[in-house]
Image (cartoon, rainbow, N blue to C red):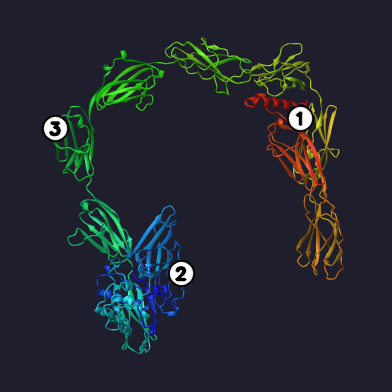
Amino acid sequence: MPEPTKKDEMSNGEKESVATDSSEAPMPTPEISLEVSPPPAEQPVETEGKDPQPIEVLKPVQPEPVENGSKEPEPEAVVVGAKEQVESVNSEVKEEAPSPCSPPPPVWSLGEGQAPEDLDKPVDTPPLSSLLIERPQGGSITVGGDISFVAKVEAQDLLRKPTIKWFKGKWMDLASKTGKHLQLKETFDRRTKIHTFEMHIIKAKDNYAGNYRCEVTYKDKFDSCSFDLEVKELEQSQSVDIRSAFKRSSEGHEDAGDLDFSGLLKHRNQREPKQDETPEVDVWEILKSARPDQYEKIAFEYGITDLRGLLKRLKKTKKEEKKSEAFAKKLDPAYQVDKGGKIRLVVDLADPTVELKWYKNGQEIRPTPNQRKFIFEQKGTQRILVINNCGLNDDAAYSVAAGEEKCTTELFVKELPVKITKEIEAVKTTVNERIELECEVSEEGAQVKWCKNGVEVPTGPRSRYRVKSEGLKHWLIIDDASKEDTGTFSLMASGGTSEAKVQVELKPLKIIQDLQDMTVLLGQPLKMHCEIFPGNVPGRWYRNGQLIQSNDRINILQRAKNHRLEIVNSTIHDAGDYTFVPEGYTQSLCAKVHIVDPPRVHLESLNFPDNTVTIVAGNKLRVEIPISGEPAPRVVWMKGERVILDSGHRVRAETFSDYTSLTIDIAEKEDTGNYKIVLQNEAGEAGASIKVKVVDIPDPPEVPLVTEVGGDWCSMTWEPPIYDGGSPILGYFIERKKKQSSRWMRLNFDLNKETTFEPKKMIEGVPYEVRVFAVNAIGVSKPSEPSKAFVPLAVTSEPTMLVVDDVTDTTVTMKWRPPETIGAAGLDGYLVEYCIEGTDDWRVTNKELTEKTKYTITGLPPEAKILVRVRAINAAGASTPRTLQHSILVKEVIEPPKIRIPRHLKQTYTRKVGEAVNLVIPFMGKPRPKVSWLKEGQTVDPTQVTIRNTDCDSIIFIRKAERKHSGKYDMKVEVENHVDTAIIDIQIVDLPGPPQCVKIDEVWGGNVALDWTPPKDNGNAAITGYTIQKADKKTMEWYTCIEHYHRTCITITELVVGNEYFFRIYSENMVGLSEGATQTKDSALIVKEGMQLKNPEYIDHDFKEPPKFTQPLINTFAIAGYNATLNCSVRANPRPKVIWMKNKIAIIDDPRYRMFSNQGVCTLEIRKPSPYDGGMYSCKAINDLGDALVECKLEVKGGFTFSELMQRGVPLHLIDKYMSETKVVEQPEK
């Protein structure tokens, strides 16, 4: 674990354990001005026309870690230490830089320093992309403890895993420090799509304390967060050897390379101090008086390897600054620039005439006319050295000499990582071919390393691999590829790695002639042959995966491309899968060899006569028949065309090595028949058959048929069973049951020899079913299927109350009531018959039964006399007819006319001008009435009003109403000498005219009294009010004072004193406001002084009143199954409570009724009424002042017939109740 930087220690408030001289003054910070230009590819910092403003940031260079902490520092390590020294000395300069949670800027420059007291001031941070959804939090632990830090990134919108880096301090990457004490872990939750990054610190040491930073990058997005770790331990106050304290620790192998100063302090009591480690001189005094460029030399001379820790503590010592005589402003101790960028080194001279020289690593820099590498500039007292296109060779110590004085600085050139711009492509080839892997990087001349399977590829003179580079491209060439070259090749650069797979295969094997599957008879020779290319490839023969060796019976031959296998006498064991495998190839040639023997069936071993097996039903049968054949023959048992499988449950066929068997677990009659055995294999086919006979009980008889039904009896017949079970039928048993029951009752205990039977003693109206059993010597069969359900029924009684409903010149309409006794058979309909008086020729008028109790007989001769009768029909037959007692004369009866005016036309019918008028007025009368219309005693003009008449109504239609259409229309309906009249009042209304003569009567105070007269034209409707508006004379903008005002005078109040007003008035009727308004001729000036008007007192009108029905309920007819509504209107104040009642019983929470009340209109809706819903309905309104009641009668016509109720399964007692209620409802109609 690296030791934190000085900035981290200062931010955490930690103290060093090395004592320093507190009396010395702090080391002053030199004022530095550094301008850094970026490489050409990056965006420049400077803007045109303005001096560049330096960004005050110091970015230290990370030193290479020392492996295992045991190597002595080499000269290169001393140079790095010098850079660290300069960086550490100047790290106290507080620069304006991004906060620890912000990314480093792409261009760095070091400007003027800050005072030490400004180091802790907050700085502004640039905005970040929000990637982290959970940031690591700081914490504190004791020495030796463990701690974990967790960062989470949501990957919902990310296409790949983001990159995360953990830092200690500002720039020390912890990825290379993982080991026993530091572990980094990454996980991904696919369900929540969250990446989790963890850093575990195990057995922490005191030098692990400091500031840490976590950076996450994804494409152009960046996020960062810093956190602190505090490691607590007891303070030690003993004196420390400076030279031993600042040596690197080598005790912890897992922490090799870490600076373990505090570790040395903890173990100082465990080791005996050596005499030669005691400092003989005061190194601190030497360092205080020395120049910064001499720190490394002094540290090396006295054996101090931890130069960074030494310089950190040296910063705390106070040192007097020697004022320079030649320089007004010196160079900063350290500068940094990116590779390829530009940097300006600026000094300010106290004496401009002094000769100035620049040095690089002690050698003087001289200007060259042809090269623009170093440029010397002069601006007043400033002397500037510009270094263009900085490279790694420019990373050196620079100094400037002015006379005898000299100031020195270090320039650090940051090398940008070399990135892969073009990946290596995968290669797939064959042996002896040339392989060329190409990769392109971002920088010319970059150092790259080629690897195979993670191991560096040797590229010496004798190596098979050649490396070539040209510009940005790098090649790895293999001239003669072999199969061993298969693997993963990679190119490693400082900024990334590119990998590709190389696959080298043998030349493809070409099969000229493949092995063929063979079938050989037992004992015959077997010869197998194949031909492949290349021809010099040997191979091996395998049978069923076992290697085949040559012997006396088996010969293996190879001639060039031909390979042969010969077996003299084939046996059963020679059958199997043969494979020829060419050596060096994964491809193989395969074939199957079958050794066959024809199959045979050995029926001679059975002792059954004529190969017939007899079995009693219910017993188990198993027949075993020997068979032979090679390979084992495929055995198929068949009964007719049906194949018997070995997986059968009751009947199954099984085959073994030397016999086959047929098994019937429980023999049934269906098992009787011929069974065929078929044997088949590759050598041939054989077959045989056996006969199985099963004796069983008979099949059930056919479904019985009920041929006749009486009131309590029926007659049935059936057919004998098809299969008698091999024994003659002895007789039958008969059973019956009620349809809704599950208990069967036997009707005969002695066998019935015949196929007919007559059950008796059944209940009328109850559905029954019957079934039959057949009996033979074996036993009783299964029952037959039940017969169709039948009901013992009787005919109904005759219809009742047969009357004449209507008579015309050719038709007679009859009405009647249902029979008093219907019976269990119900009622299917009615049959209507008639005959001419004096004859017995009854003719049926309706070919199909009618369910209605009303029928019209058509096609009758005029003025004939006929007799009519009606029969009730059900399943039992026709009832006794109901005959009309007297004859009917076929002649039309005159019906006086009657006009049925709709409710909305009993009042004045109002329409606006331009609207259509379409009125339908129904009427009654026979024969067809004559209709005439008059308007105000005059004939209606057909060009203005269209009138159309039908048999039952008259229609008056006006397409576009005008005011001249208003008036009273007289309608007259005539049938011979009978007349009925009605008056329809139609009112066509329009907008009114404006009021007349609007004048100002009086003006006092802020009030104006207006008076006017009604308009001449009221629009054929009553004036409902006026709208008064006012306007200030200055603006003449009109404002409404009051609307819907009924009087013709008004006082306008609350007028503004000093204003002068005009007034105008609109008249209003039921159509709307008048199109124009009448304005006052004079204006009203509101002056300050005026008379006081005392408003009279008015007594409020009492609007309370008891309930009163303005529209009563009316008697209504409803059709069963269609919604019906009852309406009435009530007026009362306060609002009354409305109660609906049926037959004087309140209707409460009944889902069949819905009640509405809106603006005094009360509605009761009856959903799909039935005859049950008929009766007296009443509506009662109640408030504190009284109550009111209205009633009406509701009759429901139609409903269900007896047969429909029987089909719906309604019990008989409910049907009787329903029919009786229907009679009660229909009785008043008679």
Within 10 angstroms of label 1, few (less than 14), some, or many (20 or more) residues?
Answer: some
Residue toward you, 912 or 772: 772
Helix, strand or loop for disc 3: loop
Question: At label 2, which amino acid type do we have?
Answer: Pro
Residue toward you, 841 or 1141: 1141
Image x and y of residue 188, in percent: 40, 55
Q: Quadrant of residue 384?
A: bottom left
Of pointers 2 and 1, the one earlier in the residue sequence: 2
Image x and y of residue 16, in percent: 37, 76
Q: Quadrant of residue 680?
A: top left
Residue toward you, 894 or 26: 26
C-alpha distance separating marks 2 and 1: 95 Å
Q: Which residue is the site of mark 3?
A: 553
Residue drawn 35% across the image and 22% down it? 663
Q: Which residue is the site of mark 2?
A: 126
Q: Find residue 951 and name its label.
A: 1
Q: Is residue 505 above or below residue 604?
A: below
Residue drawn 43% across the image and 55% down it? 193
The quarter of the picture where the N terminus appears is bottom left
